[in-house]
Amino acid sequence: MANNSSKVVKEVDEAELAVFKKKMKMLESFKGRHTELITQYLPPGTDRSTVMNQLSEEINQSSNIKSPQTKKNVQAALRKIIGFLKNINFKLPQNGMVIFAGNVSEIDGRSDVRLFTIIPVRPLKVKMYWCDSTFHLDHLKEMLTPNDFYALMTLDKNEATIAQLVGKKYEVLGHFTSLVPGKTRAGGQSSVRFERLREEAMQNFFKTAADKFNSYFEPHKERVKGVIIGGPGLTKNYFIEKKVIPHELEKKIIGVIDTAYTDEGGIRELVHKSQDILKDSELIKERQTLDNFLGEVAKDGLATYGQKEVEQALTENRVSTLIISEDIPWIVFRIFCEKCQKEEIVIVKDQTDFEESKLRCAICDSKVETIEEISYLDYMVEKANTSGAQVRVISTETSEGEQFYTGFGGIAAMLRYKI
């Protein structure tokens, strides 16, 4: 069972996972003032008539809600869900779909009923309808459990630091110091006795370091993709030779690296010096992508950046790799004008005081129906997939990613050719 689950997670596209995480974070931020936020889980193979009948029945049942405002918001949310399912002709993605709808206005007495969807990164197994003051995300959060990671450790005779590298981010799990005395001994002590005490202190420190390391990683040893140990001098080599790490973890040692430091700075150094070893990790892939992009920009080569330029290049199928920051806050509305019978895309960059009800048709200025609301990241990933371009989503948790966001607006592309 566990092996099958791991296989599914590894098949998840990195860009899809970034979109999934971004939506989850947004949905978690919404808090209803009353019980008026609806969550509908639709696993693959869900019967259309059963769901549509249930939603219609919920509209009827909602007439019993005492508060007129809450009743209005709940019914509006239910009608949005029904309208959306009709619009997609109830064609659910391979992994199913979760629909969220409700009044997300932070102002009491004002309605801002919006609809969001999430395509799970793993097949959905739960069918559920829920109306509450929050959106129900627990079953989706379970899908965010990291599948594998790298175990990192730096140590010398004085201290040790243990960390893990998950995706694009390293996390320090523990840092501790030793009681090993320096080589200068107190006057009057015999050199033999001093060295014996020093050796005992070293062995105790190795055991403490190993116990800490094992407590973090042995319970999850099947998910440890590799172990990398660093530090100055030969202390790290002695540590490995003492066989204090369980065999299942010891056989996963893929690198022993010289570093100048053994604190958090040593962990950063360890990651940097392990680029060849970590070439399959998301962090290294991200850095290489940005390095390639900056190289092309410097020589006015096969790269472009900026919203207008990148969207145009995607439309013309000139993009080989879309590079986009996960921190772009814009939202995209897919709207439909009943009068013009036309569908349109509206990108909203400034959400201050924004209300969906203010959206109008660009042709006739009539009120429009919102079919779907998605993040700009989601929108661009869809465009890239349609054009056959690869996607690299850049986090702002690294200095390189932050510079890409602030310096280039977080939107760029590597091109197949220039025009």
Image: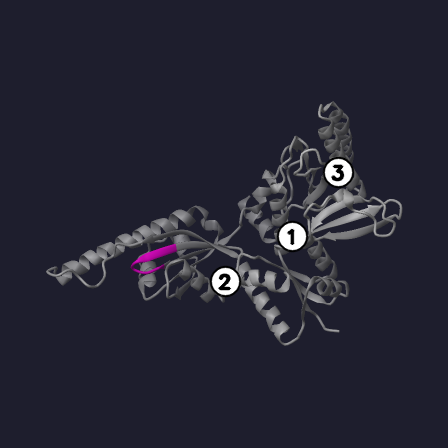
Residue 292 seen in the current view: yes
Q: CA distance from mark 2 to mark 3?
A: 44 Å
Q: CA distance from mark 1 to mark 3?
A: 24 Å
- Which is more N-terminal, label 3 or label 2? 3
Q: Tags 2 and 1 in contact by the CB under 8 Å rule?
A: no
The x, y position of residue 185, in whole percent, is: 17, 61
In screen coordinates, is 155 left or right of 95? left
Where disc 3 sits, the SS reads helix
User: Residue 297: which disc?
Assistant: none
Q: Which residue is mark 2?
A: 278
Count neighbours of disc 3 (C-alpha within 10 A) and say few if under 14, some if 14 to 19, many if 20 or more. many
- Which is more N-terminal, label 3 or label 1? 3
The x, y position of residue 230, in whole percent, is: 39, 62
The x, y position of residue 283, in whole percent, is: 53, 60
Q: Residue at x 57, y 63 (%)?
A: 403
Q: CA distance from mark 2 to mark 1?
A: 30 Å
Where disc 1 sits, the SS reads loop
For the residues carrying marks 2 and 1, which lies nearer the camera in this image?
1
Q: Residue at x 57, y 42 (%)?
A: 142
Q: Which residue is mark 1?
A: 329
Where disc 2 sits, the SS reads loop
* Residue type at numbered disc 3: Ile
Part of the protein shown in magenta: 155-161
Colour convention of the picture:
one colour
User: Residue 81: which disc?
Assistant: 3
Count neighbours of disc 2 (C-alpha within 10 A) and say few if under 14, some if 14 to 19, many if 20 or more. many
Q: Nearer the viewer, residue 81 or 42?
A: 81
The quarter of the image holding the C terminus is bottom right
For the residues carrying marks 2 and 3, which lies nearer the camera in this image?
3
Q: Tags 1 and 3 in contact by the CB under 8 Å rule?
A: no
For the residues carrying marks 1 and 3, which lies nearer the camera in this image?
1
